[in-house]
Image (cartoon, grey):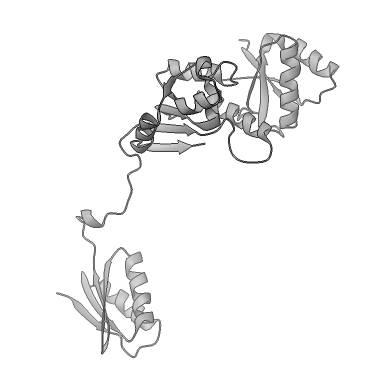
Amino acid sequence: MARIVDARGLPCPQPVLRAREAMQKADEVIVIVDGPDSAENVRRMAEKAGWVVRLDGKEEGVYVHLVRRSEVQPETCEVAPEESVGPRVLLVPSETMGRGEHAELGAVLIRSFFHTLLEVEPRPDVIVFLNSGVKLVVEGSPILEDLQELAGRGIRILACGTCLGYYELKEKVAVGTVSNMYSIAETLLTAGRLVSL
Amino acid sequence: MEPSYGVVLVPSVSHALRAESLVRGAGIVCKLIPTPRQLSSDCGTALRIPWSDRDQVEATLRAANLDYEGVYPLLP
């Protein structure tokens, strides 16, 4: 049974206060206000309190319909799951980490990052190397040993074949698998969590 | 119980890179790593070296006049 609060003609903040009062005594409240401003104030207060709000503008005033949210409301659940199903993917689209005029710093950051990957958790399930990032999987790469260690622990390493071809490094791949855009796109799209450097 | 590694703390990234180059040049295996959390440094990057080589590392850096804060044991 909805409780009706006629707040027309009342100055701010009366409509909100009266609405709140009614909300303590009922699961459904209809607040009638003069105009959209009051309606918005009531709406904001109610939504913050977790109630479902519906506005109905009529000639005589705006009807703000408030319904207390019950436990079972699957359609209105907005909370995203902490971790979705699917592999943890790390995308390395460059041989440097971050952007700036000094590639030297970016190179140091990448080395630091891959060093810490060995120590912190959770580790990625797959690491994808793209564009200049493919230089990191070939002979002479500053992170080769770390990548080999990660591969040894079961982490899949994919390097874009197009990129390796472009840099003429296909024969120098020292860790991981040469992959293609289908495989890479699929990996990125089905990732449960995707982190890109 | 002797540590396996030591960490050379330096004042900046460019010092770290120079140190790496000098130490490698001296034939010592080393690795640039983030400054370990338990150590405090002006710079977030440090150089990891075998603890047993620390004297030679320091001599190398001093010979090149490279500023460094010190060599500390790397504890797990």
Q: At x 49% / y 31%, what residue is drawn? A: A130
Front one among A39 and A100: A100
Answer yes or no: is residue A53 visible: yes
Residue A157 is left or right of residue B24, and the answer is: left
Residue A30 is left or right of residue B16, and the answer is: left
Dividing the picture into quarters, in which one does residue A52 lie? bottom left
Question: Where in the figure is residue A143, as x and y percent of width and height?
Answer: 57, 21
- Outermost residue toward the left in this view: A1
Dividing the picture into quarters, in which one does residue A90 lie? top left
Question: Where in the figure is residue A186, as x and y percent of width and height?
Answer: 34, 34
Answer yes or no: is residue A174 visible: no
Residue A179 is left or right of residue A95, and the answer is: left
Question: Where in the figure is residue A28, as x and y percent of width and height?
Answer: 20, 72
Front one among B15 and A103: A103
Q: At x 40% / y 81%, what residue is drawn? A: A13
Residue B4 is left or right of residue A35, and the answer is: right
Taking A19 as reference, is A121 above or below it? above
Question: Where in the figure is residue A73, as x and y percent of width and height?
Answer: 21, 56
Query: Which corner quadrant holds the N terminus of chain A?
Result: bottom left
Total marks shown come to: 0
Q: At x 41% / y 32%, what residue is drawn? A: A89
Q: At x 23% / y 75%, what residue is drawn? A: A29
Taking A151 as reference, is A114 above or below it? below
Front one among A182 and A70: A182
